[in-house]
Amino acid sequence: MNPPNAQPVADLSMAPLPTPQTLRRRQSIPIQLSRFAVFNARIMRMVLKGDH
């Protein structure tokens, strides 16, 4: 329970908003699928490279 005069943990009121291009990239299914595939390939490379 927070006291009534508790300060916020972080003030995000001045944080920058994403540009329209950034929003399009985040919502693009082909871009997200390719990023997913690249990320999974990197993880698999680390797993296969590791000493077991």
Image: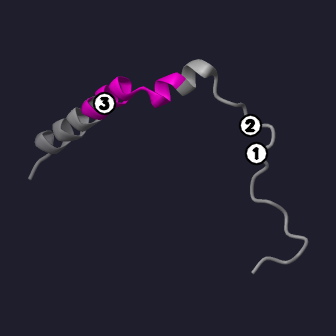
Q: Is residue 33 magenta?
A: yes
Query: Of the residues under marks 1 and 3, which one precedes in the sequence?
Result: 1
Identify which amino acid the numbered label 2 is placed on. Ala
Query: Toward the viewer: 34 or 48?
Result: 34
Query: Of the residues under marks 2 and 3, which one precedes in the sequence?
Result: 2
Q: Is residue 2 above or below residue 8?
A: below
Q: x, y (%) of residue 29?
A: 37, 29
Query: Toward the viewer: 21 or 15?
Result: 21
| Nearer the camera: disc 2 or disc 3 | 3
Q: Which residue bears the numbered disc 3? A: 33
Tell me whether the residue at label 2 lies in contact with that at label 1, contact meaning CB atoms closer than 8 angstroms.
Answer: yes
Q: Which residue bears the numbered disc 2? A: 15
Q: Main secondary structure of the magenta part?
A: helix
Q: Is residue 43 above or below residue 6?
A: above
- Disc 2/disc 3 C-alpha distance (Å): 28 Å
> Which residue is painted at 75% across and 59% down in the image?
9
- Mark 1 falls on what kind of element? loop
- Disc 1/disc 3 C-alpha distance (Å): 30 Å
The answer to whether residue 46 is left or right of residue 12 is left
Q: How many marks?
A: 3
